[in-house]
Amino acid sequence: MSEELKKEEKSLNFLEEIIEDDLKNGKYKSIVTRFPPEPNGYLHIGHASSICLNFGLTRKYPGYTNLRFDDTNPVTEDTEYVDSIKDDIRWLGFEWKNERYASDYFDTLHGYAIKLIEKGLAYVDDITAEEMATLKGTPTEPGKNSPCRDRSVQENLDLFARMKAGEFPDGAMTLRAKIDMAHINMLMRDPILYRIKHAHHHRTGDKWCIYPMYDFAHGQSDSIEEITHSICTMEFVPHRELYDWLIEKLEIYPSHQYEFARRNINFTVTSKPNLLQLPTEKFVPGWDDPRMPTITGLRRRGYTPDSIREFCDRIGIAKRDNIVDVGVLEFCVREHLNKIALRRMVVFDPLKLVITNYPGGEEMLPSENNPEDPAGGERLIPFSAELCIERDDFMENPPKKYFRLAPGQMVRLKSAYIIRCDEVIKDEKGEVKELRCTYIPESKSGSDTSGINVKGTLHWVSFPHAVSLEIREYDRLFKVEDPSDEEGDFKDYLNPASLKIVSTALAEASLAKAVFNERYQFIRKGYFCLDKDTSASRLVFNRTVTLKDGWSKEAKKG
């Protein structure tokens, strides 16, 4: 075996090893996976890992992936979420073969429930939830049988039919599997299969008032679709025994469940109930706020599908839960944006600079769109006698080894000329309002014959040609690594500096024609994209990520 093949074999994750063995041994000719979200919220970065895993396996091996919505709880589900989920999956670069819904199978699942009743393996129970919890026992003590457990098959069929007909109110009755109230696995102690919910369903309307529980709908839906490898996260390990029991007793297609560990990310929350509180209670404007870990939020912030897929590939899958540094995600997007982002000059806090010996008019200077992309071409930047630079790039009384602009000091303006600061103009408060400079005509970038060497290079914008921008500098939403693990309410740990709005920014003229599907590097500032709040009168840009990881430095200081 070649070294390349050995490396490839070593790099297989445990699911790929299982699949390769199944295909090699002829257990399957092709594989079928599924991504089964509940449409009760927007997808987040944790879901992206599962999407990339399920769809990625059927890209690598013969087979296909279904998208199946687990829509068994009509109270929390909505078509808004269905549409957003489909949009996010396609944006990530994947396409499903079949679009399915658990509700597609309500009639079949109802038939399965009747089959279990007829086999004496399910019964209708009318005790309260509190009584049921009391009878269930503890992990070290066996449970006790419900007084309803020994109802006859005929009585159970009758009661279940009346449940379906809507005779009873919510919570009055449930259908339970008859397994073993002394089972070591608490989930096997006569679990609930159906409950009563008089609620309008987003697809089936008012046809049903009884709905299957997740554990009943999940495995049976897998079986109906002949899913070969049903991949879940580790919290479903205890559920696998019930998954297998139901398939065995119903004598249906034997789908098999496999589990992998969640990859939780620091400085964020991905719990749906917690995420829901943030837009609902107006801590953020909506699910697509660029600070949210939702895929729609990451999209709006400027993350690319390539960077998220790369992140999911880097963190991999395993059988042990782990915390992933959000810096890995930020690294992935920096790496991709560095390759594709168009370079542009933007001054956030402008300080006016007048070149006193410039002959007048304007000059168009060429500059690379992206030095990482040889095919990226050039753009022309207007240069004039009136420019602006960053206020932070000037110091009136600089320390030693200060290489930016200061009185009597020279710097190069990027893609332009070397200039020298000759005079500082101040306002009535004594604050610097303008710099008077001279330029070296022979120092033009690309044809410099001046022989002058300077150590500082500054970005700049031609003042008469400048375009005004609003810039939203986003940062991490939380100021602690694990907000859910801290004392009190997780919302107490929101980062008050997670958004800074810059309304004074001036940009080079080319940004007037910015488009939504392009990414930009504002030179020396970071990576940015156009926001949906942009209008004909206002250009709004979101910071996707800084040029370097500033958080690791802060952590070291702490």
Image (cartoon, grey):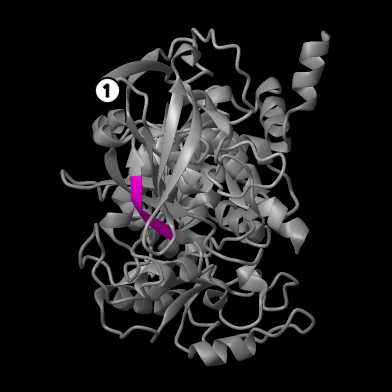
Q: As shown in the figure, which amino acid type bears the numbered disc 1?
A: Gly
Looking at the picture, tell me which residue is in the foreground, 33 or 147. Answer: 33
When the figure is inspected, residue 381 is found, relative to residue 209, above or below; the finding is: above
Looking at the picture, tell me which residue is in the foreground, 544 or 168. Answer: 544
Magenta highlight range: 500-505
Q: Residue at x 52, y 48 (%)?
A: 392
Looking at the picture, tell me which residue is in the foreground, 264 or 555. Answer: 555
Task: Identify the image quadrant of residue 195.
Answer: bottom left
Q: Position of residue 57 (x, y in %)?
A: 57, 31
Q: Determine the main secondary structure of the stretch shown in magenta.
A: strand
- Image position of 9 (left or right of 406): right
When the figure is inspected, residue 217 is found, relative to residue 68, above or below; the finding is: below
Q: Residue at x 44, y 28 (%)?
A: 438
Q: Disc 1 designates what residue?
A: 360
* Viewer can see residue 228: no
Q: Magenta stretch containing residue 361, yes or no? A: no
* Viewer can see residue 187: yes
Q: Position of residue 447 (x, y in %)?
A: 49, 7
- Image position of 413 (left or right of 28): left
Number of residue marks:
1
- Image position of 148 (left or right of 238): left
Q: Position of residue 460 (x, y in %)?
A: 42, 34
